[in-house]
Amino acid sequence: MINDNFEKPIYLAHDHMNRLEDFARDAKGGVSAKILHLTVDGWINAPSKKEYLKTYYSYEGFYDRYLLALNQLHKVIANNSDQIKLVTSYRDLQDAGSEKVLAVILGNEGGKIVGESGENLNTLFDLGVRHIQLNWSMKNCLSASQSEENTRQDTGLSDLGRNMIERMNELGMIVDVSHSSPETISDVLDVTSKPILNSHSGSRVIANKQQNLWDEQIRQLSENGGILAIHFCSRLVLGVDDRQSTIPDVISQIKYVKNKGGIDLIGLGPDWILGDTKRDEKYMHNTEQETITWTKCLEDSSRIKNLIPQLQLAGFSEHEIDRILYLNLQRFFKAVLPS
Ligand SMILES: [Zn+2]
């Protein structure tokens, strides 16, 4: 039986949408909580490609741009506190749920914001940051990224990276290994005392892109009690660059990951980044992603509920659907965030 039960919470592990109109779309779609990846480890909206490339491997400006973005976010939240709440603990997340407001967990796609010696980590925690994805598309002082896979540059976690993970475990910050190299992911699994996140990924057997995981990696992440949140970006769902994926394609990814790692591993990591004309143009040009698309009928958060009837049609039970939509991430947040 298919029903339109929109009363379920929906949690997202990877999203970049941080403007008031984006939060309105979240509300329309029934999103209850999301990890907001406020900036990226590349200056994606740099005024020119030259400036984007100049800072590709440097730390110049990344912490400052994060603070600026955070300041803007605070203003949006302060003016809309009846709809949005910045959550810094599991208790906050529960409160946001009972108040029926969108819970925003502050995060970042890349570790450059901690600084070259990790000097900013404690301050970031004090400012409410509860999540850091170690890498974006390049190596940094913490770890090697997917781009270094199968090269001599893939040296996994650095000593600083190890220290940062131990400290993040102590503080109650989410460690995210999306975009990290296989060596890095393996090292993080050895070091961490808490479950870890892969916030936007999928099966590499289905879609052979470096961001996706091989079966053995899926199994290891499952043993760690971690989360693999499924990406909605077409090329990562399908493994090819020239087609738009559909919801059944996303469900094929979910089924495959469930078969290899179990239902408890799965979350949603859409990675929406488009929808801000000014920013998008620079991002797509600077990073050469002019052809990027998201899954048809899942193009933005207002459409997220389109997934539910198709999961029902594909034979997922209500309890399995609840786990995918929020229960697994809820368990994960409880295990990792400050209580
Ligand atoms: Zn990404």
Image (cartoon, grey):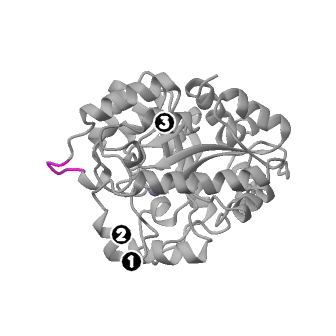
Instruction: Label the magenta part by its dominant secondary structure.
Output: loop
| Residue 327 visible in rendering | yes
Drawn side of residue 317 relative to residue 290, left or right:
right
For marks 3 and 1, the one nearer the N-term is: 1
The residue range painted magenta reads 149-153
Residue at the image position 58 percent from the left and 24 percent from the top: 335
Which corner quadrant of the image does residue 190 belong to?
A: top left
Residue at the image position 68 percent from the left and 67 percent from the top: 297
Q: Are marks 2 and 1 in contact (CB under 8 Å)?
A: yes
Residue at the image position 65 percent from the left and 41 percent from the top: 324
Q: Amino acid at mark 3?
A: Thr
Numbered circle sitting on residue 16: none
Residue under circle 2?
A: 52
Numbered circle sitting on residue 48: 1
Residue under circle 3?
A: 123
For marks 3 and 2, the one nearer the N-term is: 2
Q: Foreground residue, 135 or 186?
A: 135
Give the Cα distance between marks 3 and 1. Answer: 30 Å
Which corner quadrant of the image does residue 217 belong to?
A: top left
| In the rendered image, the vertical position of residue 256 relative to residue 125, given as above or below | below
Drawn side of residue 35 relative to residue 97, left or right:
left
Q: Disc 3 beta carbon < 8 A from ligand 1? A: no
